[in-house]
Image: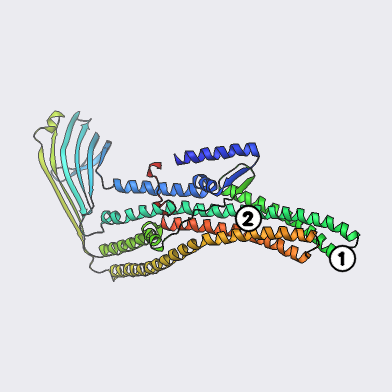
Amino acid sequence: MRYILLFILYSICTGQLIAQDSLRLTLDEAVALARAQSPQAVAARHQYRAAYWNWRTFKADYLPSLSFNSYSSLNRSISPVTLPDGSDSFLHRNQLLNEGSLTINQNIAPLGGSLFLETGLQRLDLFTDKRRSFKSTPVVLGYSQNLFGYNRLKWDKKIEPARYAQAKKSYLETLELVAAMTTNKFFALATAQSRLQSADYNYAAADTLFRYAKGRYDIGTITENEMLQLEINHLTEQSNRLNAAMEVDNAIQELRSFLGIRDNVEMVAVIGSELPIFIVPVADALHYAWQNSPDIEWYALQQLQSESSVAQAKASRGLKADLYMQVGLTQTATALNNAYRNPMDQQLVSLGIRIPLVDWGVGKGRVEVARSNLEKTKTEIAQARTDFEANVIKLVKQFNLQTNKVEIAQKTSVRAARRNEVAYRLYLLGKSTLLDLNASIAEKDSSQRAYISALHNYWNLYYALRSITGYDFQLNAPILVAEQEF
């Protein structure tokens, strides 16, 4: 449903595009489009979908399974046989064997074995003697297990939940990182547009001053040096306009490509001045980061896999034994109905043992390598956890300060624009120097860029905080993924 709404949003925006010949996007709209259709978001969605179905497959491995098996064999050949007196002779065979069975299988995770219940029927046709016979197995109960080997089922039950949890959290993190990348592209366009607007404004002002200066120069009220400086300013602003227009075109192309918009349309980044104001407690951020970050889940997964490798190395080193047991009923007859009368017991028990006597330390070496890798993994995880916590604390502190920085940058931009207006009028009145005017223009442009940069940093920190904690502090709710989408 969410993506349908986003598609409607995109259709509305496209409709606006046709009417206005440009697509006007706020940051929220750009982020929504990126999460729905950007190549990075689509790739993340497919990766998570694969992890989801791997998880479903893993869970199904611990549920009973029902299967039907059939087999047919036609044998028309001459084969050697041993006669009762011990001599060999060739016998012509012309027979057809058909068999079918239904089997219910259940894996036993704590033991690592497999329990099965089976029923089946066989029919043998001897065409040479024109005879047929049936063999029934009404019920067979069996169990097979490696007694001292590596228990894959037990370890998978520990590893696969951690793997799926990491995939889910990684998907949520990726969507937030896509939002952060969208922020970069969006504000690159916003910055380019701001520079173009400043270049247009500065060019108009420089053009007015240059034309005004010509008249003053002709009557001798300004020097030739000042006249030449104004002409240089005029030419410089012309060049700045051309460069700014090219920068806007490049930024539009990058944002359009990132959002997955194939139409060759003009785009306008609409910057909102209002920010969601809230303070993030460091303790809460750490709590949700430890709980929701895919990095933490990845550390746990790495340790489990290393412990599993140690268990597998130990199991491959020592005594190995395979146990197979089967009990049930069976009967044979020339008629199908008789094949199920008075069935006889059948039992089968097999035990195979292999003991390595001399392996020249190969098994021990594998165990020691696995143990060393486990200890190395634990050390790396401990260091990574320390760095992770420090990174969360740093991020929270930066975010909590950024709102004030945006407010300061906005006020500075407004004041610098006002100062430029005053300096412009004073220069026209002959009460200010060209140096003061140029300084006010530079301050106006740099403060506007600083304001946009402060907004950019705010939203970058905002989505970085969401990605690392998996929590929306603005709404005070966890960020969730809907499994029904898959």
Residue 335 visible, this angle: no
Query: Residue 42 location, x and y as percent?
Result: 49, 46
Q: Which secondary structure lies at badge 1?
A: loop
Q: Which of 480 and 78 is in front in this view?
A: 480
Indicate left or right for 272 with 42 as reference.
right
Tell me, for residue 223, which label it has, or none.
1
Helix, strand or loop for disc 2: helix
In the foreground, 340 or 23: 23
Q: In which quarter of the image is residue 208?
A: bottom right
Cα–Cα gap, marks 2 and 1: 37 Å
Quarter-wise, where is residue 293 in the image? bottom left
Name the quadrant of the C terminus. Answer: top left
Residue located farthest toward the left when viewing the structure as drawn = 342
Q: In this view, does 120 lie to the left or right of 294?
A: left
- The reply to whether discs 2 and 1 touch (Cβ–Cβ < 8 Å) is no
Residue at figure coordinates x 63%, y 52% from the top left: 251
Q: Which residue lies furthest to the right in this view?
A: 219
21 or 331: nearer the viewer: 21
Q: In the rendered structure, which amino acid carries the disc numbered 2? A: Thr
* 152 over 259 or under it: above or below: below
- Where does the image place residue 402, in percent across and percent down from the top left? 52, 61
Q: Residue at x 63, y 37 (%)?
A: 18
Residue that badge 2 annotates = 191
